[in-house]
Image (tube, rainbow, N blue to C red):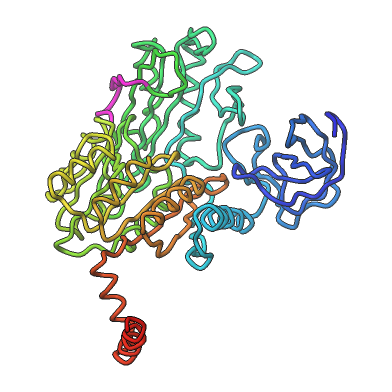
Amino acid sequence: MKKNEIYTAEIIDYTTEGGGVCRIDGIAVFVPNSAVGDVAKIRILKVLKNYAFGKVEEMITPSDDRIEPDCPIFQRCGGCTFRHISYEAEQRFKHKRVYDALTRIGGLSGEQVQDIVSAGAVDGYRNKAQLPVTTDAEGNICVGFFSQGSHRVIPLSECALQQPVFNRAIKPFLRWANEVHPTVYDEKTHSGVLRHLYLRYAQKTGELMVCIVANADELRKENLLVEYLKELPELKTVVLNVNKDKTNVITGKKCRNLYGDGYITDELCGLKFRISPLSFYQVNRDQTEVLYGIAKKLADLKKGETLIDLYCGTGTIGLTMANDAEKLIGVEIVPQAVEDAKNNALINGITNAEFICGDAAKAALVLKERSITPDCIIIDPPRKGCDSSLIETIYQINPERVVYVSCDPATLARDIKLFCEKGFSVQIAVPVDMFPRTAHVETVVLMSRPLTEHEKYGEYFMNRSVSDIMSEYSEQHDEWH
């Protein structure tokens, strides 16, 4: 196999990122924007020792899953993965991804993995947009998305995944930018002012936040920018976020309100949450209610019980369950998130919640030292999953139930295996599609704690009749004598 050679092959699987895979001369070839079932002529672009990369040169027989992409920049933009296949096919891929990880890596039986919970809306669900600012071929300021695997910005005027109000909010921003002509940030030289247009929308209340991320403490003609943006009836606040660091992190730590009070308020699971530019909030509100509803059902909290929410962020998932428990303790390492969590509890009149700032593993040890024995622990870690020390600490705390909310099937499967080695039992795993048209998938897993020796004996006797027990005793008695 050599670069630029063309082979006929069938796409037989997907990568975890959603790209197609075929085999040519026994070697896996990764082909983006292809679909399982495609038969095509594949041009080889790059050959490595154990695999290669290619592209579809000519389609011979398209997959039955294929649909016509409805976005003109789909193949160049890195925002979507699956605009070229049906939603049903996308759901099969996501369920298979979770199923394969949990059975092959995690050691679960297939019966424990439930059907995927699909999303009600596949477009217009994202309530947050972070759009890098760039210039087009004519030198006009525009915004867009990074091309997949690069920092090259693909200009756009609208996006099907975003809330429709975002597509309207782009226009007054660009009107101001192309009248005032501020410089555009260049990450190579660390020069220029405008870095990102950052938009957030509270779907339930209809409040819009426009945040400009800049490599400067102020913008030219800020009042004109606000004037243009106020043409949007949904506008609640305009914020300048100052980020002067040489970093790929989008936002800086300093914010200044140009209009309004610097936050929007949304409603989730019957509670109100205040969202600032630096607050964490799930990007798909409606499907978050579904996800949290599943987690709440699996947690099965009762009055008198204690719930610990590790990696609690701004407290959303724990606070939605607080009324079902006697006590909620949230743990989060980011100080601002902890303050947001406390404010969210205050806003909603929740008085049985305590939030601790610190590393999840260390904070769990502190709780153990305080002789706090939780009935249920919820963990919603970042993509890298749990640290092994945290799993050990949870084992030492010995809660009755652990609800694990994961955004990565591979790290979830790895962690589940470690939990099972500690004696935990997986009861059920539920995949949830939070991000339609992308390769991401969430999973909620319920685990029960290891049985104590006393409980093992109790279970042993409860599951056997008296005659069976006496028969086994007689057999052992004969062996002893």
Question: Residue 224: which quarter of the image?
Answer: top left
Residue 217 position in % (x across, y down): 34, 11
Identify the residue at the far bottom of this view.
467
Q: Residue at x 36, y 54 (%)?
A: 422
Whether residue 256 appears in magenta in the rendering, the answer is yes
User: Foreground residue, 5 or 453?
Assistant: 453
Residue depicted at 47% across the width and 45% down the height? 411
Q: Is residue 235 above or below residue 251?
A: below
Q: Is residue 135 highlighted in magenta?
A: no
- What is the count of numbered marks? 0
Picture coordinates of residue 233, whole percent (x, y): 37, 36
Left or right of residue 138: residue 28: right
For the view shown, which residue lies furthest in the front direction? 481
Residue, x 25% and y 47% (percent of image)? 272
Residue 282, how many percent across, how many down? 39, 43
244 left or right, relative to 97: left
Task: Tell which of 171 and 273 is nearer to you.
Answer: 273
In the picture provided, is 450 more to the left or to the right than 58? left
Q: Quadrant of the N terminus?
A: top right
Percent x, y of residue 243: 38, 16
Residue placed most toward the observer, 463 or 28: 463
**Quadrant location of the C terminus in the rendered image:** bottom left
Q: The magenta stretch spans which residues?
A: 252-262
